[in-house]
Amino acid sequence: MLALSSCLGHFSAAAQSKTKEQVQVTINLNAIDKDRVPVTVQAPKIKTSEIIYHLPKIVPGTYSEDDFGRFIDDFKAYNKKGAYLSVTQVDKNSWKISDATQLGSVSYLVNDTYDIEATHEIFSPVGSNIDAGKNILLNTHCFVGFFDNYKDINYKVTVQHPDTLWGATSMADTDASNTNDVFVTDRYAELVENPIMYSKPDYTTFKVNDMDILIAVYSPNGTHKAEEIAPAMQKMMTAQKNFLGKFNSTKKYSVLIYLSDMQVENDAHGFGALEHPTATTVVMPEMMGLDELNEQLKDVVSHEFFHIVTPLTIHSDEIQNFNYTAPKMSEHLWMYEGVTEYFANLFQVNQGLISEDDFCNRMAGKITNADGMDDTMPFTTMSVNVLTKPYKDQYLNVYEKGALIGMCLDIIIREKSNGTRGILDLMQKLSAEYGVHKAFNDNELFAKITALTYPEVGEFLTTYVSGSTPIPYDVYLAKMGVTKKVVKSPGNPFLKGQVPYINVDQVTKEIYVRTEVELNEFYTELGIKGGDVLKEVNMKPYNLDNIYELIQASQTWQNGDPISVKVSRDGKEQVISGKIKIPTEDKVGYEPTDASKEKLRTAWLKG
């Protein structure tokens, strides 16, 4: 899951009148017990007889109701003299406090989500890790809540921590000590958008134009270091800034990278990222090689960084005034996630990080993936109802068809402007029309986009985005002189699409070759047969516990590389040696064929 984030918005007049009030939070990382962190919240002056304290049901950047209150234990409320006040839990995320005019503070314990991922579906970059003395991934929405009607006042958060742990964040620490960090935000929404990762310091910084970039890494076994990851990140983010041109962005941006130890049973398994206005939280498997990790980070982090365009700058009322307890979704995920994903691919060909063929193949892959989804479900309908079935089942299409919508809009604008303008120009104009502090109404966006571009753009949006007609991608690609072809694409020795060639005996944990599928060239060339148990590959033992490592290793194999495989066949072990034959698959691809469109195509991909 790549993620959506709300922008911070502007204060209401009522909120401005409360700027002297403050919610004071203390998070004690020195007192972790049974993977639970104590949190104390000093309340502002409450003027009502009852008050409700909430943890979020949902947070910006996610499209699932995660109910973070589920991970709260031992919730208590105290008056100003320290005596208990009556508390009633209203729902999973809310606690009603009686005699609230006397409220002094609340306290509770926070459980993490990583070591119990089998019990919930919270995407790892959205959750929390609590590993005392080693790592605390402190997504603030997991630890801190809000009182009804007090979200828009000042928050002061104090984090007490061992001097061996350092907190990586885009927030400014106003406390100079090595064991106490103090962060102040103007309101709750700003706090939620600022994650902190505490661990042994492993970070590096660099500048991209006038932006300070922080790369912080937690690698439990020391496999990867920030200084090794930083050069590829700097190259990528420099290219992004060059691509974006005059788009303004934050002065500091942090990338917090948590690498999951796949050798242990209870660690994060949801790989991807969650973006914020000034940060991205990333979760990836530690076992990846550096080159593969950098490739994954290039795609994932670039997507998150491009969210500074939308929705962090361009967004609807639903995002400007995000409701953490009763969320209302916007119609325009095609723009927030789809255009963002399109930019994450377009900038790479634009800046020479990938070839035109690579770009075309990526778009071909998205067409194939989108064809596997419900292509007649109106995208705006899916978007506004994305929290409920059957619409939530189509969410992943925002990264497939959503990106293709962005591509088609770009093509239309390029064609109509004779190559001088594209979708980036449109987003710059929308940014000028709206911007960080001004939201649009959902139902006005299509008309505004049409006014800023061409009638054909409005017709496309009505027919293919809010309508149920499937997009004829070939027609739009042909406008740029690009046509369909069948290409031979490298496959994986162990998987064909979603179908595996291997399976695991859950009792013995042994990996064996399936007998009921036709084996590919990798097996037939080596003489490996169905039913063979794979004991070792290149002298490294494999079983259920590290099968993911085997799959990852195979991604780096090349045709003709030597390989040895120890198998058990009919109870007898033998070593099979030979050369790797990478299987190929016929896939639909696209290639430039119309030389008369070369100038227009160059403007599209390089302009």
Image (spheres, rainbow, N blue to C red):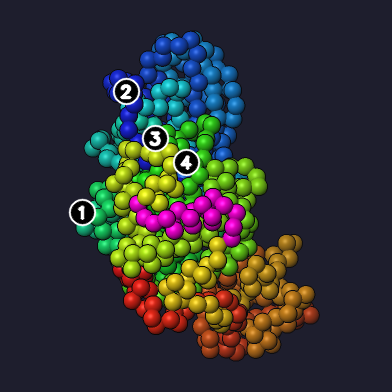
**Label 2 residue SS:** helix
Residue 36 location in percent, x, y?
51, 36
Q: Nearer the viewer, mark 1 or mark 2?
A: 2
State the residue position of label 2: 13
The region drawn magenta spans 452-470
Residue 395 location in percent, x, y?
57, 51
**Nearer to me, 432 or 200:** 432
Alpha carbon distance from label 4 to label 2 = 26 Å
**Label 3 residue SS:** helix
* Residue in view at x 54 percent, y 56 percent: 464
How crowded pointer 4 is (Cα within 10 Å; few <14, some 14-19, many 20+) is rated as few
Mark found first going from the N terminus, 3 or 4? 3
Q: Nearer the viewer, mark 4 or mark 2?
A: 4
State the residue position of label 4: 443
Which quadrant would the C terminus be assigned to in this image? bottom left
* Residue in view at x 48 percent, y 68 percent: 476
Q: Nearer the viewer, mark 3 or mark 2?
A: 2
Asked if the residues shown at circle 3 and circle 2 are in contact, with their CB atoms under 8 angstroms apart, the answer is: no
- Residue 243 in the image: above or below residue 440: below
Mark found first going from the N terminus, 4 or 2? 2
